[in-house]
Structures are given as C-alpha cells and as structure tokens.
Amino acid sequence: LAAHRHAEGLPATSMAFGLWDVDTGMAAHLTATDLDRMRRAGTPALSRDEGLALFTLALASGEAATVPLRVDAGALRTRTDELPALLRGMVAPARKRTGAGGAPAGVSLAERIAGHDEEERTRIILDVVRAHAASVLGHASGDAIEPDRAFGELGFDSLGSVELRNQLGAASGLRLPATLIFDYPSAAEVAAYMARKLAPSAAASPPAIALEADIERLEALLASDAPGVSPVTTPDRTRLADRLRELAGRLDGQPPTYAQGYATPEIPDGGEDLDEVTADELFDILDNELGTPATP
C-alpha cells in the first residue's frame, strides 16, 4: 500500500521493524533463550535507542518501504540453514567449518558413520542431535540433553523445533520433514530416524532378524492380559502351538508337517527356506489364526 501511494505521489512510509529489546508488546513474552536464538540467527534485537534512530532515518530516507533491522554479518556467516533472500547479499557464502557434535571440517555425517555397526552409527548421530539441541536451547554441551526426554519437556517451542530441524538438516544433508520434532519427540528417536535415513541399506535387517519384532507382537497378542485383546481359548492355543512348532521346525531345517485343519501356506517359488518368506506373508498366517486384522 505504501509503495502504491508513493507511486501516486501520496505520502506513505512503511517500516518492517526487527525486534526491539523491550518488555512490552510481542517482546514481553520472549525469554532469554528466544533472544539468544535471534542473535545466533544474525538478527539480534534492537535497543530502544537504536530503534528510535532507525525510525528517524526511515522517515528521512524518502523510501516507501524500509526494513529497520539490526544485522550481525558474522552470525549470518555461521548459520547452517539457508539465508532468507533479503539477507543473502550481506554476507559471503559460508565456508565449511567444524559443527556441533565435533565433526571435522568438510566431513559429512554420512562419512563419519561409514564403516560402523548400527549401534555405533546411532550413537554418533545421537551425539550430533544432542549437541544441536543443546545449542538451540542455549546449553553449553549436549550432556544437558537427556536422550529419551521429550523435547517439549526440555523447553522446545515451535521456533526452537524449526531451528533444530534446520540445523540437523544442514549437518546431515538430509531433507528432514518440517514436523521432525513432533513425529520423533526425543533426541533418541530423532537419532534413530536419521540413522535409518543415512544408512538404509546398513540399517536394514536380514529377513529372519526382521521377524523378531513380529514375534514380539505375537507374544503380546497371546498374552491373556494384553490390552484390548481377548484371551486365546485353550483349543485355539493348542492349534497355534502346533502351527508355531511347525514354523520353528522350518528354522531348524525340518520339513513342515501341517496340523490337521490347516492349509499349506503359499511359499514363494524356490523351496522352504524361511528367508524367502516375507514378514507380511508369515504374519498374515499368524493373524489369520488369531482372528485379528493384519498390521499394514
């Protein structure tokens, strides 16, 4: 509107101010952590005197629209996320540097975890997540971040969550979802998610090992006190026990002898090797016997 009026020769001046360091208005609800976050982002708060001086300069500039904003070029250079378009011309492109979590200059997170087993990969990534989370919250080190404690309990708000997601995206090279911190609400869960994304082939389990999670689910279903599941009757347990013994025999290399009343399950071409049966195929059998819907 100001630009339009200006073009028509009418008076108008619009000022898109940065934050003032005062305890009134929108700033009244900001904490020291919030102010520190803005400082790290390269846009620290304006003092009262700075704000008034910029107001006077904006009026005298003759420009229809101005952005009275305090900018810290040094802090802008250290940002790990993409700079807003308005600020990109103020600093040279950032050089690769040692980041949170102790990463050597120029070494990607994927390179750091290469060659390690799953447990060590997750530990390395967890250290990075904790270090960046501590940085966002203003802590001196990642030791202040409990791996299994919810981010909300640690003091994260929406802005902090976005900042953490941006930092982790820059540190890992991954395209992380905007809802990362809400979908994975603790440092340990974020680290496990990133480990799967960074090393999907290494993180993937062999078929037989992948079935362990399904077996645990079966154990819960068979438990008479499982929440929301009716106890399995004695005859059903007998039939299921027979069927599970047959499956166990296949693990030991014994030919299957299916119990009376059960059709032979369809196995992929190639024989009776359990590794050739997918988890979905095996669990469809178990789900059908239990009378419960299959899990997607």
Image (cartoon, grey):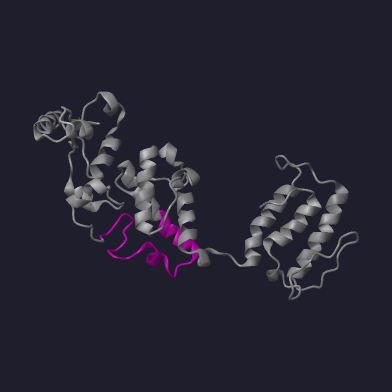
Residue drawn at x 91%, y 61% is: 260
Foreground of the two, 50 or 167 = 50
Q: Quadrant of residue 286?
A: bottom right
Residue 249 in which image quadrant: bottom right
Q: Residue furthest right?
A: 260
* Count of numbered badges drawn on the protein: 0
Indicate the quadrant containing the N terminus: top left, top right, bottom left or bottom right.
top left
**Range of magenta residues:** 97-126
Is 162 situated above or below 174? Answer: above
Q: Is residue 170 left or right of residue 253?
A: left
From the top left corner, tell me how far across and down residue 73 is, in percent.
17, 48
Q: Position of residue 153 (x, y in %)?
A: 43, 37
Q: Residue at x 13, y 30 (%)?
A: 55
The residue positioned 74% from the left and 42% from the top of the image is 229
- The answer, for residue 17, to whether it is visible in the render is no
Which residue, as the protein is rendered here, is positioned at the far top?
A: 24
Decide whether residue 117 is among the magenta residues: yes
Q: For this view, does 58 lie left or right of residue 207?
A: left
The image shows residue 153, relative to residue 85, as above or below, that is: above
- Work out which residue is located at the far bottom of the displayed protein and give it: 270
> Does any portion of residue 127 appear in the rendered image?
yes
Residue 218 within the magenta-colored segment of the rendering: no
Percent position of residue 23, x then y: 24, 25
Identity of the residue drawn at 18% across and 43% down: 71
Find residue 270 and report its horizontal and vertical position in percent.
Answer: 73, 76
> From what the image shows, is residue 21 above or below residue 282?
above
Give the farthest residue toward the front.
8
